[in-house]
Image (cartoon, rainbow, N blue to C red):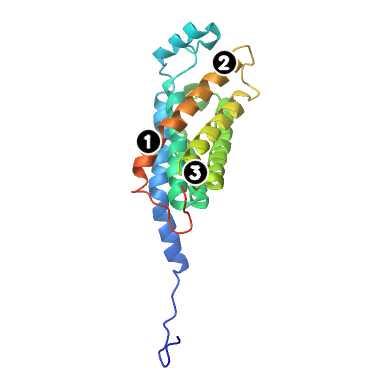
């Protein structure tokens, strides 16, 4: 029934600056989390995984003691953060958070070089070609993970976070290890296999904290499912 004689109050929509402020506030936690994950992986990038030598007992070609570090093991935490952000805010804001995080990391490195905290990036951090390959491979892998999550989110809830983390990690491994400056030898297949095992383990294990956080980190309106 129509409300005769009653003036309807028009629904006001948030203004531009209100939406801008809301988007900025939503970016803070994901951006900080992404930067922290990269920072931890960077700090332990030269710390070898002692347990890697046991893989050689299964097959000598699986000996990863010379290249497997905790930095590589910690790095997949990036995809866990992307999954939670995608679940809550959807792909657009998650992509924005990824872009802002890269800008902040680049800004900090530029500032450190300008202030003399880093004398030579190529010698003290990593050679420039390898750094460019890492950034390109990880940026692409993040995009793949975000799009995968958005594509398959739904019922069952674990499908999107599992596939996003797994496919994103494997995409990074393939892209980075097939860079022009990489060493193409007989151990490359073994490296792919070990890294795939790491990303599979991460994709599986991160389902436990994701499941526990589902009641806390609920999707906003329009982002149901996972």
Q: Are marks 2 and 3 in contact (CB under 8 Å)?
A: no
- State the residue position of label 3: 98
Q: Are marks 1 and 2 in contact (CB under 8 Å)?
A: no
Q: Circle 1: is it few (<14), some (14-19), or many (20+) Cα within 10 Å?
A: few
Percent position of residue 65, x then y:
47, 11
- Going 59% across and 23% down the picture, which residue do you hit? 177
Q: Are marks 3 and 1 in contact (CB under 8 Å)?
A: no
Quadrant hosting residue 190? top right
Q: Secondary structure at mark 3?
A: helix
Percent position of residue 110, x then y:
48, 37
Q: Is residue 173 left or right of residue 112?
A: right
Q: Between 170 and 161, which is closer to the camera in this rendering?
A: 161
**Upstream in the sequence, badge 2 or badge 3?**
3
Percent position of residue 59, x then y:
53, 8
Could you give the CA–CA distance between mark 3 and mark 1, rounded to whole angstroms?
Answer: 24 Å
Could you give the CA–CA distance between mark 2 and mark 3, rounded to whole angstroms?
Answer: 30 Å
Q: Circle 3: is it few (<14), some (14-19), or many (20+) Cα within 10 Å?
A: many
Q: Is residue 214 above or below residue 205?
A: below
Q: Nearer the viewer, mark 2 or mark 3?
A: 2
Q: Between 166 and 226, which is closer to the camera in this rendering?
A: 226
Q: Is residue 117 above or below residue 91?
A: above
- State the residue position of label 1: 208
């Amino acid at each position: 029934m129509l409300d005769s004689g009653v003036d309807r109050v028009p629904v006001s929509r948030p203004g531009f600056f209100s939406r801008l402020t809301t988007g900025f506030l939503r970016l803070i936690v994901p951006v900080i989390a992404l930067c922290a994950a990269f920072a931890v992986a960077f700090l332990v990038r030269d710390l070898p995984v002692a347990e890697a030598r046991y893989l050689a007992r299964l097959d000598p070609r699986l000996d990863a003691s010379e290249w497997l570090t905790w930095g590589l093991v910690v790095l997949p935490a990036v995809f866990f953060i992307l999954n939670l952000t995608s679940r809550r805010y959807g792909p657009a804001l998650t992509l924005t958070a990824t872009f802002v995080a890269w800008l902040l990391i680049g800004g900090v490195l530029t500032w450190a070089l300008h202030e003399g905290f880093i004398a030579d990036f190529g010698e003290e951090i990593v050679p420039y070609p390898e750094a460019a390959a890492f950034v390109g491979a990880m940026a692409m892998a993040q995009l793949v993970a975000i799009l995968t999550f958005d594509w398959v989110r739904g019922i069952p809830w674990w499908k999107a976070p599992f596939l996003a983390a797994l496919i994103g990690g494997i995409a990074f491994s393939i892209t980075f290890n097939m860079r022009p400056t990489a060493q193409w030898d007989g151990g490359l297949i073994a490296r792919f296999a070990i890294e795939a095992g790491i990303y599979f383990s991460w994709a599986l294990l991160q389902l436990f904290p994701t499941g526990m956080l589902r009641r806390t980190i609920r999707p906003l309106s329009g982002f149901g499912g996972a």
